């Protein structure tokens, strides 16, 4: 799930000896004093599991809250989590989950089906609780616990995502006492996952400790720290000092000769986009924001898309570590990825100019075209994250290309808080953004529906582009109810084709995750998926859970500290990316969707 409105830098202490899937791990105490440090350049948006949608926030929360199901480290197929097994009714309208016996919260209380029923019922009844993952429960009728081990979910229509519910299950005995669901939680948080979040300092760090009550067994390291760094250079130094982080391609290449460092060039699971405000509105359809009215015209948006050369951005900004843009679902998830083929918009400035001429966008005396409907010149603001590698390096290319077709661009590097506020309020023309994809595409597909638009206060839902198209919504409803994988994949690809035609965004590309770790500190890492997968920001928690210090692998009792470094999208990308964060007003510093 989780939206990753843009890139950041992740520095993570070395991980090693990871499990290849949800296999049983011998119960053992974490090695005393061993610390895995993860360096991030994206600030945490929220540690409230009902609110967090950024890469960093959700990555941390996955280690604290187990879900009903998780994903295999090897191939990302659904595997048992808190639920040992599940069974749908013949009509696919009733799902019965059996919660595993003996699992405990970190405070010693038993984990039961009542915790899951409480979590889901809260989302059904409370708009704030639906902020991050409301799309999963939208088609539901009820969620009840018939006893401590049996959870029964009834849906209004068949729902193909019932084994891919990316919803953290919270402890009822804690959250039932929470009067404000939009507030940040108290620490230490009560955990069902391999780690317990114990401390948080804004713009500094998030600290976790091994959960001795974790049902799979305690991790091999005692401490897991996510350390915030303001830039990639600081993260690189952290790696050399023993931490983990993400780098720019140049920094990644520079580490090639270091004998103590192992590098990992992994295929990323996210797409990067340039959003064009198509006419922002709230969930009642009332217009909000101040986007340029000309951008409501899909002919103009298509011309802009044709004037942006994704291949050049991949080569010049990402150093070749990525793939040019195509469909909305990243190519890592090949089953659902749409390739436009003959419908692709080949970079062609002459064709873009011709299209604008034919649409009536004539040039003024200064060469800037004029909107025939409003009479306003095509002067657009391009909002970028100040200090973000990709934004800073790609913006001059985009500004130049659009100037060649008669569009004047003012690049506006702003703070993360400003990006968050502006995109939530619809006060932008063009802006950088991006999202992590999931093995099941439903979450990111839901971001383009009419239901994803927030209320007048900017809460209750998470939009991507503010698109609202009945044709898209109809396809979305159909794919959600389709259990035939091939038929569902076809519907998903039709949705991506419609997005391509309407062009509320330009898919700029899919950046690789460039990672590195100190092999003299940690033994190895489990990548996911296999082969060629990532160490950090996995779909589950296997990387952090299986981290094994070198001393532990060798049988030593000495404590150890390590760091892992990753480079994503041409930026040191620890958790986010220098992109834009729409939707809810969580923390003003949020800059990255998962």
Image (spheres, rainbow, N blue to C red):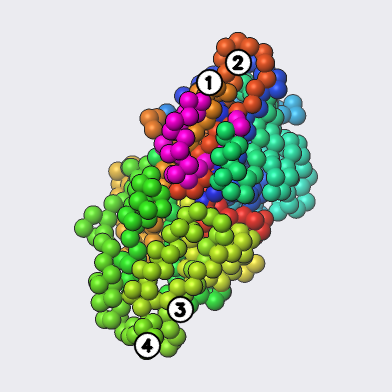
Nearest the eye: 447 or 403: 403
**Which numbered dot is residue 364?**
4
Side of 378 relative to 546 (left or right):
left
Task: Determine which residue is flagged by label 3.
Answer: 379
Q: Does the stretch in magenta take in 245? A: yes
For the residues marked 4 and 2, what is the alpha-carbon distance in whole angstroms?
70 Å
Look at mark 2 in the image and give the residue it sits on: 552
* N-terminal-most mark, 2 or 3: 3
Looking at the image, is mark 4 or mark 3 earlier in the sequence?
A: 4
Residue at position x 38%, y 47% in the image = 319
Residues at circles 2 and 1 in contact by the CB criterion of under 8 Å: yes
Q: For numbered disc 1, what is the local secondary structure? A: loop
The mark nearer the N terminus, 1 or 4, is: 4
Distance of label 4 from label 3 (alpha carbons): 12 Å
The answer to whether any part of residue 442 appears in the image is: no
Which stretch did the figure color magenta? 241-266
Crowding at dot 1, Cα within 10 Å, few <14 / some 14-19 / many 20+, comes out as many
Question: Which is more N-terminal, label 1 or label 2?
Answer: 1
Above-or-below relation of 153 to 78: below
Check disc 2: other Cα within 10 Å, few if <14, some if 14-19, many if 20+. Answer: some
Considering depth in this image, is 579 or 194 the residue closer to the camera? 579
SS label for mark 3: strand
| Residue that numbered label 1 is attached to | 523
């Amino acid at each position: 799930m989780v939206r990753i409105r843009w890139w950041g830098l992740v520095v993570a202490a070395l991980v090693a000896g990871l499990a290849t899937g949800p296999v049983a791990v011998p119960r053992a105490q974490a090695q005393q004093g061993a610390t895995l440090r993860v360096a991030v350049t994206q600030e945490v948006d929220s540690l409230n599991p009902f609110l967090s949608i950024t890469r960093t926030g959700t990555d941390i929360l996955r280690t604290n809250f187990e879900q009903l199901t998780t994903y295999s480290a090897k191939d990302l197929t659904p595997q048992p989590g808190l639920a040992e097994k599940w069974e749908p009714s013949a009509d696919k309208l009733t799902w019965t989950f059996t919660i595993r016996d003996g699992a405990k919260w970190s405070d010693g209380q038993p984990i039961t089906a009542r915790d899951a029923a409480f979590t889901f019922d809260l989302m059904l009844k409370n708009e704030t609780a639906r902020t991050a993952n409301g799309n999963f429960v939208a088609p539901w009728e009820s969620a009840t616990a018939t006893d401590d081990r049996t959870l029964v979910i009834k849906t209004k229509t068949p729902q193909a995502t019932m084994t891919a519910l990316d919803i953290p299950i919270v402890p009822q005995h804690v959250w039932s006492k929470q009067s404000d669901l939009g507030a940040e939680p108290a620490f230490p948080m009560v955990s069902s996952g391999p780690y317990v979040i114990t401390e948080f300092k804004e713009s500094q760090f998030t600290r976790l400790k091994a959960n001795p009550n974790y049902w799979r067994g305690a991790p091999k390291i005692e401490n897991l720290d996510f350390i915030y760094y303001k830039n990639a250079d600081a993260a690189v130094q952290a790696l050399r000092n023993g931490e983990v982080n993400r780098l720019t391609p140049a920094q990644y290449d520079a580490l090639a000769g270091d004998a103590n460092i192992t590098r990992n060039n992994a295929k990323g699971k996210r797409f990067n986009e340039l959003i064009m405000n198509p006419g922002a509105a709230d969930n009642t359809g009332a217009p909000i924001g101040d986007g340029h009215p000309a951008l409501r015209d899909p002919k103009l948006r298509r011309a802009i898309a044709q004037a942006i050369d994704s291949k050049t951005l991949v080569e010049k900004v990402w150093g070749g570590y990525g793939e040019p843009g195509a469909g909305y679902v990243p190519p890592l998830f090949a089953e659902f990825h749409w390739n436009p083929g003959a419908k692709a918009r080949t970079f062609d400035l002459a064709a873009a100019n011709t299209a604008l001429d034919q649409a009536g966008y004539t040039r003024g005396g200064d060469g800037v075209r004029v909107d025939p409907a409003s009479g306003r010149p095509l002067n657009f603001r391009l909002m970028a994250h100040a200090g973000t590698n990709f934004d800073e390096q790609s913006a001059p290319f985009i500004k130049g290309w659009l100037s060649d077709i008669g569009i004047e661009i003012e690049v506006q590097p702003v703070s993360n808080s400003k990006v968050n506020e502006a995109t939530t309020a619809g006060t932008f023309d063009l802006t950088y953004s991006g999202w992590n994809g999931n093995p099941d595409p439903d979450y990111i597909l839901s971001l383009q529906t009419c239901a994803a638009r927030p209320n007048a206060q900017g809460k209750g839902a998470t939009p991507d582009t503010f698109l609202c198209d009945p044709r898209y919504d109809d396809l979305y409803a159909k794919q959600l109810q389709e259990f035939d994988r091939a038929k569902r994949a076809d519907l998903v690809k039709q949705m991506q084709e419609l997005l391509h035609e309407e062009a509320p965004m330009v898919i700029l590309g899919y950046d690789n995750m460039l990672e590195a770790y100190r092999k003299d500190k940690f033994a190895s890492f489990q990548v996911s998926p296999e082969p060629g997968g990532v160490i950090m920001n996995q779909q589950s928690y296997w990387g952090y859970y299986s981290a094994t210090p070198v001393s532990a692998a060798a049988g030593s009792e000495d404590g150890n500290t390590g760091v892992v470094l990753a480079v994503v999208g041409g930026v040191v990308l620890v958790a986010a990316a220098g992109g834009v964060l729409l939707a809810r007003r969580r923390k003003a510093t949020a800059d990255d969707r998962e």
